[in-house]
Each structure stands twice: as C-alpha cells, then as structure tokens.
Image (cartoon, rainbow, N blue to C red):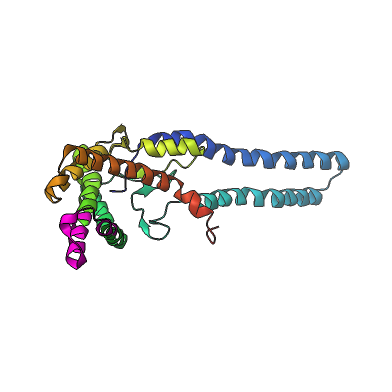
Amino acid sequence: MLTTRNAAVSLVLLLSPALVWPQAAVPDKQSGPAHDQQTRQSGNTGGSASPADAGTQSKSQTAEVSPALVSAPVAQKTDDSELKQTKRIFGFVPNYTAVSARTEVPPLTTRGKFDLAMHDSVDYSSFALVGLLSAESMVLKSYPEFHRGVAGYSRYYWRAFADQASGTFFTEAIVPAITHEDPRYYTLGHGGFRRRTMYALSRVVVTKTDSGGSEFNFSEIVGNGLEAGLSNLYYPARERSLHNTVTNWATMTLVTGAANVLKEFWPDIRHHMPGQK
C-alpha cells in the first residue's frame, strides 16, 4: 500500500548530455598540457633532439596522461554506486519497488507484479507494522465493538493486515496487470529539493506503462479506491459510509505520496549516514 510508480523515460534524455560530456572532455584536457609540454621541449632543444631523447619524452608524456584517463571512469562508477536504491530503507522498511536513477530495467510480467506484491505483503516488517497499528487502535478504542484483551487485539490485527495486503495487491498487481502499468517507483535523482519533491508527489497520478509510455496512474488511484471499498465488508456497520470510504482512500493516497518522497531521497540520506561513505 506504500508503493507507487512513475514515468521516467525522459530521465535518460535529460541526463545523457551530462554523462557523455565529462567523458569526452577528459581527453581534451589531458592533451592540452601534453601538447604544450612537447612544444616547449621542442623549442628548447631545437632540431638537435636525438631519437633516444624523443623516446624518453614520449614515454614520460604517456605516463603523465594515462593515470588521469584511467581514474575518471572509476570515480564516476563509485559515485553512481553510492546513490543506488537499496532493498530496505533504514534496514527495515521494504523498498522493493524503487528503481535507482539512471537505471534501465525490463518491464514486469504479470507474474512479476504478483511476486512483487507478495514480497511487500508478507515481509516481516509488514507484520510488525500491522502489530503496532493494531495496538494503537485498540488503546484509542477506534472500534469499541472489538473490545479489549487478546481477542480484541486479534480483531484489530487481522483487519489491519487485510487492509495492507489488499491495498498492496490492488495497487501493485491486480490493477497494473489489467492496465499494463508499471507499479515501480523510478527515482529522478537529480535537480533541487523542490523539483524532486514535486516529481515524487506527481507519481501518485502519473505512472509508467509496460511499453515505456506515461499515463494516468489508474493502479494507484483506482487500486486504493478498491481497497477502501473492500474494507466495508469487514469493518463495523457504522464505518460503512461514503464519507469514511473516501477518507480512507484519501489517506492511503497521501501516504503513497509521502512514501514516494522518502524513496526519492533515500539514496541521498543513506549516502550521508555514518559508515555509508
């Protein structure tokens, strides 16, 4: 229920000049000093340089240029690896649907979408989170009909688990399989805070399709609506109003937007955490 998707084909087009330019600029910067050095050496020795001297100069220039040419791609690779998405956020929250910036992945099959939803639904963190939410609801007496004690807690628990599991399957598997949408979140990874935040929030209503295009995010909007409607079947009668259903749908949609923002900035957060550099 905490995951969503995006349309990021334009990312490659936006970032490709930045990726190509530094690699093309390195040889030019290296050849300038080498050429000047050779010119000065030629001017100092005139035409009297021996073949042995010329060979020594050539080897010296090669030794000076080679380390710079070799080290540049290695530095770029290190920077990219430091800003990758991980399978978990803070080592606990599942992050299976996030795709790292500047990363091309094949489209998900229908089976892949259901596998993704299954991993999110039965992850150990999901059971723990549902347990905490159920305990809070019982303490606050959100549904007095459920009463207290172990029996009351179990009534809160299985309903909360049904909420998160059905929401996950609706938004990550069932609706995406029908609409041919990609349920994953594609990290933007560049630009200022405001731009990346707006991008993350916009992925609630815009998503990437299996064919690589962009369209309205039926998976998230409709999927959350289906979960909100389904919950009317197992919650007390006084909760089965249109107002409560819409409120439930709006809450899940807002949570999805907040989760997208966290996913967008998680690589940056992890990069600045102690022991991660």
For residue 103, what is the image quadrant?
A: top left
Is 31 drawn above or below residue 124 in the view shown?
above
117 in relation to 253, above or below: below
Q: Is residue 108 visible to the viewer in this orientation of the structure? A: yes
On screen, residue 88 versus residue 56, left or right, reads left
> Would residue 233 be found to the left or right of residue 184 on screen?
left
The answer to whether residue 8 shows anywhere in this view is no
Q: Position of residue 8 (x, y in %)?
A: 38, 37
**Residue located at (63% from left, 48% from top):** 69
Start and end of the magenta stretch?
136-160
Q: Is residue 187 left or right of residue 271?
A: left
Type of secondary structure dominating the magenta stretch: helix
Residue 152 lies, in percent from the top left, at: 18, 62
The image shows residue 202 at horizontal and vertical percentages of: 37, 35
Residue 96 placed where, x, y %? 34, 53
Q: Which residue of the protein is positioned furthest toward the bottom in this rendering?
A: 150
Closest to the observer, 253 or 28: 253
Asked if the stretch drawn in magenta spans residue 8, the answer is no
Question: In the rendered image, which quarter contains the C terminus?
Answer: bottom right
Question: What residue sits 81% from the left and 50% below the top?
Answer: 53
Residue 147 is one of the magenta-drawn residues: yes
Which is more toward the observer, 71 or 156?
156
